[in-house]
Image (spheres, helix red, strand yellow):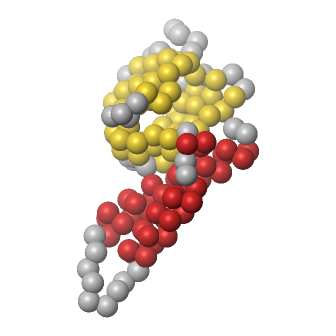
Amino acid sequence: MADRLRLEVSTPTRLVVSGEADEVVVPGSEGSFGVLPGHAPLLSLVGTGEMTYRAGREEHHLAVSGGFAEIGPDHVTVLAESAERPEEIDVARARAAFERAEQRLRPQAGEEGDVADAMGALARAQVRLQTAERRSGGA
């Protein structure tokens, strides 16, 4: 059995992470799940949330949204629609997106909106802000 996991996280436009990890926590579509070396094979949808991975004593965070995760005894491969490191997140833009999504959820007289789309936008903005806060914590 492998003692570490080969971790790759990519989006349609770039490779975000390529390395080894001791533990990975993925925001699945039905809730987050943890992966350690020796995990049973699994294919899962990726939801919107914060992905965490640990290499030694260092913990790393990514804001991810959508896609698929393939898990094996010695690897975790995440093909995400979007994935950002804390230092890559434009906090002002994320706050503005959060406020726009909140506004879309407020009922307006005579207007009908797509609540599911607005909820998704709100969740994505919220996880980006949460992950961006990790930047100042040094993690």
Above/below status of 53 relative to 81: above
Q: Is residue 37 visible?
A: no
Q: Report x, y in % for residue 39.
A: 47, 22
In the picture, which quadrant includes the C terminus?
A: top right
Q: Does the rendering let one see residue 124?
A: yes
Question: Is 58 placed left or right of 69 in the picture?
Answer: right
Whole-percent x, y for residue 51 in the image: 52, 39
In the current view of this chain or complex, which residue is farthest to the bottom?
Answer: 109
Q: Measuring from the top left, give residue 74's x and y in whole percent.
A: 47, 15
Occupied quadrant, residue 60: top right
In the orientation shown, which residue stands out farthest toward the top? 1
The residue under the point 43% across, 76% down is: 103
Q: Compared to 21, does 137 lie above or below? A: below
Q: Residue at x 33, y 34 (%)?
A: 12
> Is 1 or 112 nearer to us in this picture?
112
Q: Position of residue 85 (x, y in %)?
A: 55, 39
